[in-house]
Image (cartoon, rainbow, N blue to C red):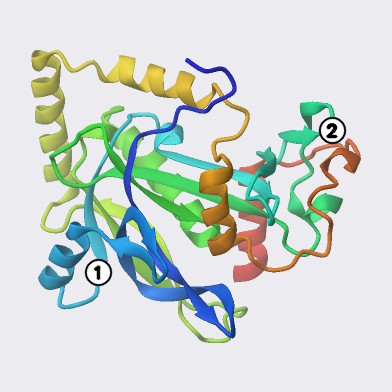
Amino acid sequence: MLKGLAITPPVLGRISIGKVVEKNGKRLPEKDDQFTITSQVQNKDGWLPHPLDESLRKEQGGKIRNIPIRLLFNDPDLNFRAEYSLFDRTTGRPLCVGDGQNCKRQTEEGIKSFPCPSPDACPLAKGNACKPYGRLNVALGDDDPLGSFVFRTTGFNSIRTLSARLQYFQAISGNKLSCLALELRLRGKSTRQSMGTPIYYVDITPRSGLSTEEMLLQAKQLDEARRQAGFDQEALDQVAKLGLGNGAFEEGEEDGGAVVEEFFSSTPDANPSAASTIPDTPMNKTLGQKLEAKALAVLG
């Protein structure tokens, strides 16, 4: 295994609730009210649709609002990774990644660890340069149980909801998260900040047509069948954890460029190349605590 290279779940395609469009010669992110499933191939018009996109659109009358999924791992943190992230908007290279307590940062002397003050208190994060950034890997269909489609988001509502759902489903299933028949579901809400305009976020629920009890019963049966066939889910989770921890940053320059274009395209007030100048600010709150505080401020 190459040291310093994060080994991430194999990606077959992408899931998004927005797209990048060209306006006045600039490529800008644009929100949407539906899911789009794309391949990993891109042309001048954007990412090419995956065949699953067309089939789900036909089933749902033109707009994809829910997607049947399974998860690869029993550990919620392997399926969905969320951190505060800062990218170099010119090269797409990740510069700093933290959890609100500690961070790994690219400096002139290499990658170093520092306390993470979160974007609200970090000088490098001025101008919305650093954001909560989450990646969810899910399996679609039954053709490749180890291949995945990735949903990326910097939306607070999606990050908080996905984190909570995965932890809850792990708890009620007795750590059989990878055996649950689930679906991604698009939800809308309005807030004072949105001025009455709906904002859309992603949730995970039992698959349409299944009650929670039916879903849990099916998961128990699938878990027993897998064990009898020799499928070692515990070993898979352990290998995935080691692979993700093999690198300081999950995204490289190749994937980082697409992430920057879609989520980090606004011009920051701070210079993102000045990572080594950030002071060692004491940390008081974890990522979860900061996100919860932000939610209370918005909803209160």
Residue where numbered disc 1 is placed: 64
Mark 1 and mark 2 lie on one chain; the one further toward the N terminus is 1
Question: What number is the disc on residue 108?
Answer: 2
Which quarter of the figure is the C terminus placed in?
bottom right
Disc 2 crowd, CA 10 A, few/some/many (<14, 14-19, 20+): few
Q: Classify 224 as above or below 93.
A: above
Disc 1 crowd, CA 10 A, few/some/many (<14, 14-19, 20+): many
Residue 74 lies, in percent from the top left, at 33, 29
- Say what amino acid the circle numbered 1 marks: Ile
**Residue located 12% across and 72% down the image:** 58
* Front label number (1 vs 2): 2
**Residue located 76% across and 39% down the image:** 116
What is the quadrant of residue 36 in the picture?
bottom left
Question: What number is the disc on residue 198?
Answer: none
Left or right: 97, with 173 as reference point: right
Total numbered circles: 2
Residue 57 lies, in percent from the top left, at 18, 70
**Residue located 28% across and 53% down the image:** 205
